[in-house]
Image: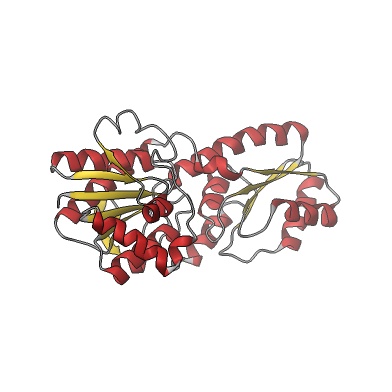
Amino acid sequence: MDKLAILTRDCAGVNACIRSIVRTCDKLDIQSFGVIKGYEGLIDGNFKKLSRNDVSGIINKGGTILKTSRSKRFYNEIFQKNAIDNLRNNNFDGLIVVGGNGSLTAANIIYEKYDFPVIGIPATIDNDINGVKLTLGADTAVNVALDALDKIRDTATSLERIFIVEVMGRKCGYIALQVALSGGCEEVLIPEMDFNYDKMCEEIKIGNNRGKHSWIIIVAEGAAKASEVSDIIKEKTGLETRIAVLGHIQRGGRPTSKDRILGAVLGNYAVNLLNEGKKGLCVRLNDNCLDTILIKEAIQDKKIEKEIYYKLIKLLT
């Protein structure tokens, strides 16, 4: 292999991953190029040659130095062919895609439909890639949300208020559940599980009568909106509530040591796989062992062990 391209989405740890890819390529005498602005850049042929100097001092930075975008154009076959032509006409031998379900779905199209060598690196704060225990960026997102929650708790306790805190997670409640457990919250609502509002409100009223006046409920955005939960609680309990929507702060911030190391390990592994002629694979680190699954398997809906979720949620009560 002589030349590869790197395409990324944004979350903490991605820059550490880019750094690892470029440094590994340098050692193997492979030219590495960044695709600027994700799949939009691939369609427009926006490539930048990367050297060790370009990735110096980025391991601690959030986001991605390559910029990114959501590309609706890529799902039009005309623009897919533009992207593939740009890869082939510029003599690229392979592509590494660092991203979540959407990015990896597009990567699978490049591999299966156009027979171009691709390796995927799972990077998403939602931790919703099938077959992957922990995705790049998820650990940082949880810790960013937890830090915000700790500050909210100070206010909730001081003012004796009920707070509903909305975190990211359209289809996956990973962040919500992790934050609720580590933050000592009273309730959590996640997309994977049904929830009984009547039971929750009754528990709040009983707790309030016993002198418990502060209450923190974590809500994954895919389960409900904080404002909706707040209205239900007000109606059923008559108690005052406040909401906090954490939003995109969870996608940013300095990556944790876990995400920096994970990015470095997966980046190095991805380059070596492409150099060995492997393709159509998604790399992962499960139980301290590096291995792969097919990208087409990684983009399937993640299998959830609901029994485990039930046991974890019971720890909150």
Tell me what residue is drawn at x 50 percent, y 60 percent: 72
* Front one among 175 and 55: 55
Q: Is 98 drawn above or below residue 110 in the view shown?
A: above
Q: Is 193 drawn above or below residue 33 in the view shown?
A: below
Furthest-bottom residue in this view: 113
Tell me what residue is drawn at x 44 percent, y 44 percent: 11
Tell me what residue is drawn at x 29 percent, y 66 percent: 111
Quarter-of-image position of residue 201:
bottom right
- Image coordinates for residue 85, horizontal then vertical, percent: 30, 60
Quarter-of-image position of residue 92:
bottom left
Scheme of colours in the image = secondary structure
Q: Is residue 114 left or right of residue 317?
A: left
Q: Is 38 drawn above or below residue 26 in the view shown?
A: below
* Front one among 220 and 205: 220
- Image coordinates for residue 29, horizontal then vertical, percent: 13, 42
- Image coordinates for residue 295, horizontal then vertical, percent: 33, 64
Residue 285 appears in the rendering: no
Q: Is residue 216 left or right of residue 309?
A: right
* Front one among 258 and 38: 38
- Image coordinates for residue 108, horizontal then vertical, percent: 34, 65
Residue 106 appears in the rendering: yes
Q: Is 220 drawn above or below residue 145 in the view shown?
A: below
* Front one among 280 and 300: 280
Tell me what residue is drawn at x 15 percent, y 60 percent: 277
Q: Is residue 95 left or right of residue 79?
A: left
Number of labels in the image equals 0
